[in-house]
Amino acid sequence: MATEKAEATGQNILDAALDLFREEGFEQTTMRAIATRAAVATGAAYYYFPSKDAIVLAFYERSCAEMQPRIAAAMDAAKGFEARLRELIRVKFDYFTPNRGVLRALLKNGADPKHPLSPFGGETKAIRDIDLAWFAKICEDGGVRIPRDLEPELPGVLWMFQMGVIFFWVIDDSPNQARTARLLELGAKVVTGLIRLSGLPMMRPVRKVALELIAIVKGE
């Protein structure tokens, strides 16, 4: 078990790295520079984190853990599918605002599913699964009837919707990311409306095509 001093040192190195990622960019930052900023030996930085990728994964894991009570509180306060979908994503905005520059620096790597830092990759599957469980809960408790054939795929579709909105938020240079706020508000409304419509008998052929598209994206 890590001692309190060891945990503090690891946290110091992580925070120093995030500062440098914001200031210099991910690719330009070196482990030596991180160690210098954290006032530790380079060897000590490598002891705690064998690579910059390991630092970012630790950041992802810490963020995921710290957001769980915030998401739970938002889900309890929000009523209905649309509100819960919107508020879940807003929790991410609120949490990541201090590190929005870090996310921007990681965009290049995040887009490649084979990169270890990609939210679509194997190394981040545990974090992704936690997110998917929240979207599944929205589907279960949101008060919207979901067709049986669509139900298993919908959490993943909502997760992809979230990732698209977060991507837009990261690159949104409007004051206080006002464009993203409006995008989320309208997007959550449209997504909820489409799910409601998907249960109509006349929408069965459209659902079939949509499910085929999902299968193509998933590589099935």
Image: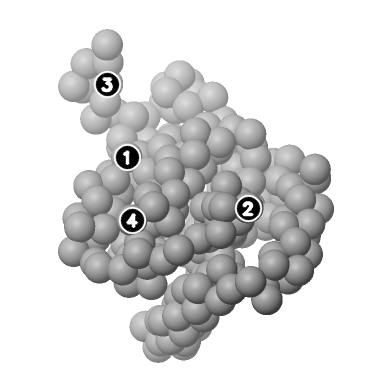
Q: Which amino acid does label 1 sit on?
A: Ala
Residue under circle 4? 141
**Mark 2 element type:** loop
Residue at 25% across / 68% down in the picture? 79
Task: In this rendered view, identify the residue nearer to me: 80 or 7.
Answer: 80
**46 horizontally vs 140: left or right:** right
Mark 3 or mark 2: name the one nearer the start of the chain: 3
Residue under circle 2? 149
Mark 3 or mark 1: name the one nearer the start of the chain: 3
Check contact, mark 3 vs mark 2: CB within 8 A: no
**CA separation in Å, label 3 and label 2:** 50 Å
Residue under circle 3? 6
Check contact, mark 3 vs mark 4: CB within 8 A: no
**CA separation in Å, label 4 and label 2:** 18 Å
Name above or below for residue 64 compared with residue 24: above
Q: What residue type is labelled 2?
A: Asp
Circle 4 Cα neighbour tier, 10 Å, few/some/many (<14 / 14–19 / ≥20): some
Q: Which amino acid does label 4 sit on?
A: Asp
Residue at 48% across / 57% down in the picture? 102
Residue under circle 1? 65
**Mark 1 element type:** helix
Q: Nearer the viewer, mark 4 or mark 2?
A: 2
Q: What residue type is labelled 3?
A: Ala
* Quadrant in the picture for the N terminus: top left
Res 36 visible: no
**CA separation in Å, label 2 and label 1:** 32 Å
Mark 4 or mark 2: name the one nearer the start of the chain: 4
Mark 1 or mark 4: name the one nearer the start of the chain: 1
